[in-house]
Amino acid sequence: MFSSPYYDTLLDCLPDAGQVKKIVRGVSWTAALLENGQAGVAMHTEGESRPRMLDTLEGLPVRRAAEAALSWNLEEASEGMAVINACFNTEARADALGCFYTASALEGIDVAGKTVGFVGHLISHSGITEQLLAPAKEFFIMEREPKPGDYPDSACEYLLPRCDLVVITGSASVNKTMPRLLELSHNAKIVLTGPTVTLCPELFSHGVSRLNCQVITDAPGMLDLIVQKRTSVNAFSRHCTLDI
């Protein structure tokens, strides 16, 4: 394992009680179901060149299982992040924190004249469209599997410091690039978006300005569908947003 302030924050804020009941590896998403019925998801990230830290997360206390987020076996790290999100991303918590519900990661944010950077091909996701970005000065898309017009993700090192607004996919927390992305974006307003984003306001201390995440509202339906095909979890969740 390794130590990083970003992951330390997530782990330190976890509840002391609770147990993992079930882990489900889907096509696009990995899900965790806790014994209390709470469920969370994280982007299913391939990569098992390194051995697992733990044989299984099922049956473990949530605090122990969540440490799998630090694993360099990225399949296991997906499971660990799903456990973390099962703990944090609930409707009751969103309401208590005063979140507002919107599918748009940029709701209420003025992009006019700004240089905007996207880590992940987020156009047509999280309520983001090219029409919405029309007033921006320019925008860059940096993607690990780039589509036509995208920059490869290695361009983050050069483009993010130029941006006024940076929108980062939550899956960066699984592959361990999140801390560096936040560092590169420290002069910008930073929005984290997607089902892998954790509803943890303590992340604001790492330069984040907005958390745009999802809380699972239909765990059985979500668990059943994600193993069948590549799909979103929108039909089984609510989008919620928390600003600093």
Image: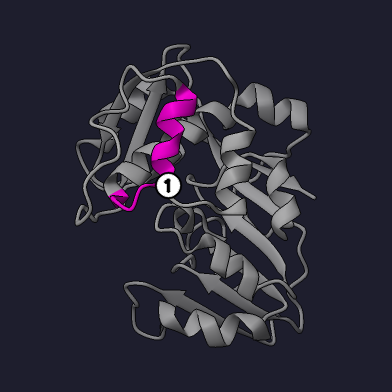
Magenta stretch contains residue 91: no
Helix, strand or loop at disc 1?
helix
Segment colored magenta: 62-74
The residue nearer to you, when weighing 71 against 165, is 71
When the figure is inspected, residue 145 is found, relative to residue 168, above or below; the finding is: below
The residue nearer to you, when weighing 46 against 69, is 69
Q: Position of residue 28 (x, y in %)?
A: 29, 48
Q: Position of residue 178 (x, y in %)?
A: 53, 61
Q: Residue at x 54, y 55 (%)?
A: 126
Taking the image as shown, residue 14 lies to the left or right of residue 25, namely right
> Which of the 4 image quadrants contains residue 143?
bottom left
The residue nearer to you, when weighing 89 against 67, is 67
When the figure is inspected, residue 9 is found, relative to residue 153, above or below; the finding is: above
Q: Position of residue 231 (x, y in %)?
A: 31, 46
Q: Position of residue 95 (x, y in %)?
A: 72, 27
* Crowd class of label 1 (few under 14; some 14 to 19; many from 20; radius 10 Å): many
Taking the image as shown, residue 167 lies to the left or right of residue 97, namely left
Q: Residue at x 25, y 37 (%)?
A: 25
Q: Residue furthest top?
A: 36
When the figure is inspected, residue 183 is found, relative to residue 85, above or below; the finding is: below
Question: Predominant secondary structure in magenta?
Answer: helix
- The residue that mark 1 highlights is 70
Q: Residue at x 76, y 79 (%)?
A: 112
> Which of the 4 image quadrants contains residue 225?
top left
When the figure is inspected, residue 84 is found, relative to residue 153, above or below; the finding is: above
Taking the image as shown, residue 74 lies to the left or right of residue 139, namely left
Q: Residue at x 75, y 75 (%)?
A: 187
Number of marks drawn: 1
Mark 1: amino acid: Leu
